[in-house]
């Protein structure tokens, strides 16, 4: 089962400490070596982004930042055997933020990627 | 350090099992090094799972569940070793010769348990795939110890009865104990043969999923996924081994087609008829990257790398006709030199048939038909039927597909061959 994990949150005013990056790299390495992490990357703030929208038949292109209170921070694509396994990996990921970046708050949304079985 | 429990999320049975699946291979590997006995290690690990299942629903999942499991396991291991040491002393008191036992259970080296986890895992893989065991036993033991699958799950995946798998695993562990197979990474001189044994098992698991040899399903995706995970794990542990990357590339590339190999009602769809838009681009990208890693390591390509090259030819092509069939035919020649087999030759017949015309392909297939090796192999008449149909020899083609349908033990495949027969009926 493939899951897309989307991390969003509100960064505190302090810069992310190097220990956080180290812990993220370590966990990412573990997940990669376990053969479950297929792809992951960080996302630049939405101030660098663009939104293309369709409303009432009109396509509008708007430069970021987006108005949502939480910024999308990163995505990760996992291939695991159960939703619970995905939850476990995501929990480890947010705990790292708690342990290494005081004041950070956020969430990981776990969405299952449609697979062949879902078309049957 | 069983640190303060914080119920971060509901410690349901399935949540605990998820943690267990992530942690159990490393746990068993660490315990196997302490006890020197894979069977004992697995039992200890199971004990720890039982403790977690009792405690976590009440106390919450510990903050570092992996560390908690490891610490608890260490205590259990020490207890067991002390018990055995006491038992050994008692035996000595009654005058038995205990030299060998005393040597087996020295002072426990538990503090080092967290070190060299990667090495331990690799040792565990090599012991589970030891050539002293049959390929079937290796596959079952590997799925159990490294895949973290239950006996029930393994039995279901291989479509055999649960007691059969349980017995297979018990016997395998006994064989390892009887032969006193050391919990060690093979010596350099031994490595190529031992690694081949590991790769064979992983690919066997993959193939059992990819081309289910029996039963009603054409593909059993969970076995493919399991084999891929094992392959990726091994590539992380042995990044310098060309053939490991070759095998991973091969599996990623083949798995990229899984979604396109089955129709809406579960029917089989062969490569030529697949909707290539349904191929998994991510797996193709990963497969090509793994192939590149294998190529960069250099040396003469091994059989997995060559097969991955062939799979890459398909992955890069946007249609059957734009496929580089000449390169594929040439790669099958290389593969035939590395691993001579009538099956490889049959695949070459298909490629030659595409590259140089059906008549040329049929010549090769006909030579194979004259040999007894493939007498009961359904793919031979299937390939001949296909080539004959292209040459408009419809009667013969129908006969060949009829033979293929009679020979296969996979229901989906039989339906596919029967469909070809009706397609080839005179209007």
Image (cartoon, rainbow, N blue to C red):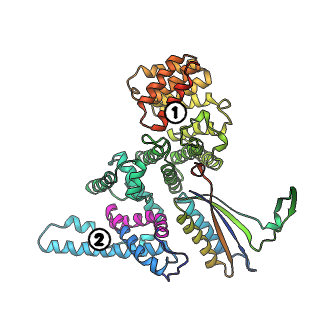
Residue B123 sits in which quadrant? Answer: bottom left
Q: Which residue is mark 2?
A: B106
Q: Please indicate, yes or no, whether residue B106 appears anywhere in the rendered image.
A: yes
Look at the magenta stretch and give its main secondary structure: helix
User: In terms of depth relative to the viewer, which is nearer, B77 or A56?
Assistant: A56
Q: Position of residue B373 (x, y in %)?
A: 39, 27
Q: Secondary structure at mark 1?
A: helix
Chain letter, disc 1 residue: B
Left or right: residue A113 versus residue B393 is right
Q: Position of residue B410 (x, y in %)?
A: 44, 38
Q: CA distance from mark 2 to mark 1?
A: 61 Å
Left or right: residue B315 versus residue B135 is right
Q: Is residue B409 above or below residue A78?
A: above
User: In terms of depth relative to the viewer, which is nearer, A71 or B311?
Assistant: A71
Q: What is the span of residues highlighted in magenta in the rendered image?
A: B14-43
Determine if marks 2 and 1 fall on one subunit: yes
* Residue at x 58% of width, y 63% of height: A29
């Amino acid at each position: 089962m493939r899951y897309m994990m989307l991390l969003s949150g509100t960064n505190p005013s302090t810069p992310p400490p190097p220990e956080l990056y180290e812990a993220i790299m370590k966990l990412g390495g573990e997940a990669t070596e376990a053969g479950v992490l297929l792809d992951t990357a960080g996302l630049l703030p939405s101030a660098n982004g663009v939104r293309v929208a369709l409303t009432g038949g009109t396509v509008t292109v708007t430069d970021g930042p987006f108005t949502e209170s939480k910024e999308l921070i990163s995505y990760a694509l996992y291939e695991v055997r159960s939703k619970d396994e995905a939850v476990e990996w995501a929990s480890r990921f947010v705990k790292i933020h708690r342990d290494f970046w005081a004041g950070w708050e956020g969430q990981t949304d776990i969405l299952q990627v449609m697979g062949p079985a879902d078309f049957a | 350090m069983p640190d303060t429990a914080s119920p971060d999320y509901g410690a349901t049975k399935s949540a605990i099992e998820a943690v267990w699946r992530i942690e159990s291979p490393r746990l068993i590997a660490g315990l196997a090094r302490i006890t020197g006995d894979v069977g004992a290690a697995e039992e200890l690990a199971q004990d720890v799972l039982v403790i977690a299942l009792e405690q976590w629903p009440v106390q919450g999942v510990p903050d570092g569940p992996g560390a908690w499991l490891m610490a608890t396991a260490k205590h259990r291991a020490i207890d067991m070793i002390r018990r055995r040491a006491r038992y050994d002393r008692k035996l000595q008191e009654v005058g038995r010769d205990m030299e060998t036992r005393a040597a087996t259970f020295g002072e426990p080296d538990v503090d080092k348990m967290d070190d060299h986890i990667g090495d331990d895992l690799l040792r565990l893989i090599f012991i589970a795939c030891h050539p002293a065991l049959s390929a079937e036993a290796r596959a079952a033991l590997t799925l159990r110890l490294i895949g973290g699958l239950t006996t029930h799950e393994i039995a279901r995946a291989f479509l055999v009865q649960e007691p059969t798998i349980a017995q297979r695993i018990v016997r395998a562990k006994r064989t390892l104990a009887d032969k006193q197979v050391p919990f060690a990474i093979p010596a350099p001189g031994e490595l190529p043969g031992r690694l081949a044994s590991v790769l064979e098992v992983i690919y066997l698991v993959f193939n059992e999923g990819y081309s289910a040899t029996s039963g009603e399903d054409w593909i059993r995706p969970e076995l493919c996924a399991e084999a891929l995970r094992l392959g990726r794990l091994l590539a992380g542990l042995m990044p310098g081994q060309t053939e490991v990357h070759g095998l991973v590339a091969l599996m990623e590339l083949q798995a990229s087609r899984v979604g396109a190999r089955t129709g809406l009602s579960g029917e089989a769809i062969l490569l030529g008829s697949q909707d290539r838009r349904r191929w998994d681009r991510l797996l193709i990208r990963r497969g090509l990257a793994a192939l590149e890693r294998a190529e960069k390591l250099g040396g003469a390509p091994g059989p997995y790398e060559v097969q991955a090259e062939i799979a890459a030819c398909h992955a890069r092509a946007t249609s059957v006709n734009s496929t580089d069939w000449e390169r594929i035919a040439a790669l099958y020649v290389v593969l035939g030199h590395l691993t001579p087999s009538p099956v490889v030759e049959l695949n070459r017949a298909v490629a030659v048939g595409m590259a140089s015309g059906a008549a040329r392909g049929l010549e090769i297939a006909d030579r194979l038909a004259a040999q007894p090796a493939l007498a009961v192999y359904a793919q031979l008449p299937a390939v001949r039927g296909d080539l004959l149909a292209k040459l408009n020899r419809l009667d013969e083609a129908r006969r060949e597909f009829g033979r293929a349908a009679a020979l296969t033990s996979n229901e989906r495949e039989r339906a596919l061959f029967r469909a070809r027969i009706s397609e080839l009926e005179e209007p």
